Image: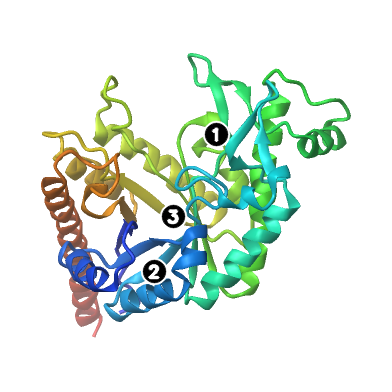
Amino acid sequence: MNQVEKLRLGVAYHGNRILKHVDSDLRDIIDHNFNMILHTFSHNDWDRHRNVMKEIIQMSEGYGLDVWVDNWGLAGPPGDKSHFLGYSPDSHQIYSDGSMDPVRVCLNSPEFRSFTKEWIDVIKEAGAKSVYWDEPHLGAKTVDKNGKPIIYSCICKRCQELFKEQYEHDMPTEFTNEVAEFRSWTIRDYFKEVTEYSNRKSMENIICVMLEAQHGISLDTLGLIGEIDTMDNIGSDPYWQLRDDVMIEPYEYVYNATKLNLDLCKQYNKDHNIWIQGWNTPAGREEEIIYAADAAYDAGARTIFVWGYRGCESNDYGSKNPDMTWKVVGDAMLRLRNRHRDEQLSKLRKMAQMEMVTK
């Protein structure tokens, strides 16, 4: 059976820590054709739900779901605001106009890197085997019409010193190519350090980046992360329904992004993860989830996740019709599962027939 290629279909789950409801939700997730689940594990979970999260991970695995654990909001959005900054106010990101980002952490902060390692210890004790590093990025207060940052972070004293060490001149407030390069280096250096730590604990490391270049890391620069030996899986989330005033054709958009992502995975010998948008779905556009999921599969993705459970109805950015969204998500996953089963069976039949002929 080692010739059979596994199809991994997962969904993000967060916002509930009541075990009775978790149990019924897990069965619902399986009924919607998923075999993987992502659990967020925030600073608040660390403080208030540590033992509960351990039970949730055990329950998920008990139902046969593979589990990824998300560093939700540790460094700030996306996800929660960083509670770490209450303990280390010197670790805020600073913008090039001198203002402080109130909720995001500088990734060059040694205190934050130590804190991240403590978090790894906590999730390891809770049973995590795979760490999902969620949409890392540095802030941009303003961008030009092409998405290039104008007022950017981080330009704190720590970053200024590191920049000067590398480029032998002061860090400019203007966004230059060197600044862009330094920001990407910052993200890479952070993940090199923390994934080496989790790797020593026999944990798998997975990352997902946004597509927009303004964040310091994107599909265009994902190769920098691919160079890290201890990063096992590099992915992206080609979400197409981000703005009401911009219409993006989902199939082409997701297909092209997935192809680029998989090309990088092949180049750096990494596994992949591709995310389908199941949040903020406008009423009447739920069917686009089918097109996007098929596009990712057609482009070669075999690890496909949806964000998130029931259209993220527990959030303000939830889908307008969560029941319909969740129904279509289940339909999309069933389509992929049936396609994949038929393809694998066809291969097995051909192999069996060839063996009969040779005998």
Question: How far apart are labels 1 and 2 at the CA level?
Answer: 27 Å
Q: Quadrant of the C terminus?
A: bottom left
- The label on residue 272 is 3
The residue that disc 2 covers is: 67
Amino acid tagged 3:
His
User: Compared to 250, does 89 lie above or below?
Assistant: below
Amino acid tagged 1:
His
Residue at horizontal 32%, vertical 54%?
A: 305
The residue that disc 1 covers is: 215
Image location of residue 76, percent across then percent down: 54, 45
Viewer-side label of 3, 2: 2
Residue at horizontal 58%, vertical 44%?
A: 223
Dividing the picture into quadrants, the one containing residue 352 is: bottom left
Circles 3, 1 touching at the beta carbon (< 8 Å): no
Residue at horizontal 72%, vertical 54%?
A: 111
Instruction: Pick whichever of labels 3 and 2 is earlier in the sequence.
Output: 2
Instruction: Pick whichever of labels 1 and 2 is earlier in the sequence.
Output: 2
Q: Nearer the viewer, residue 10 or 322?
A: 322
Amino acid tagged 2:
Val
Q: Quadrant of the N terminus?
A: bottom left
Q: Secondary structure at mark 2?
A: strand
Image location of residue 120, percent across then percent down: 58, 67
User: Compared to 314, does 41 lie above or below?
Assistant: below
User: Compared to 189, does 250 lie above or below?
Assistant: above
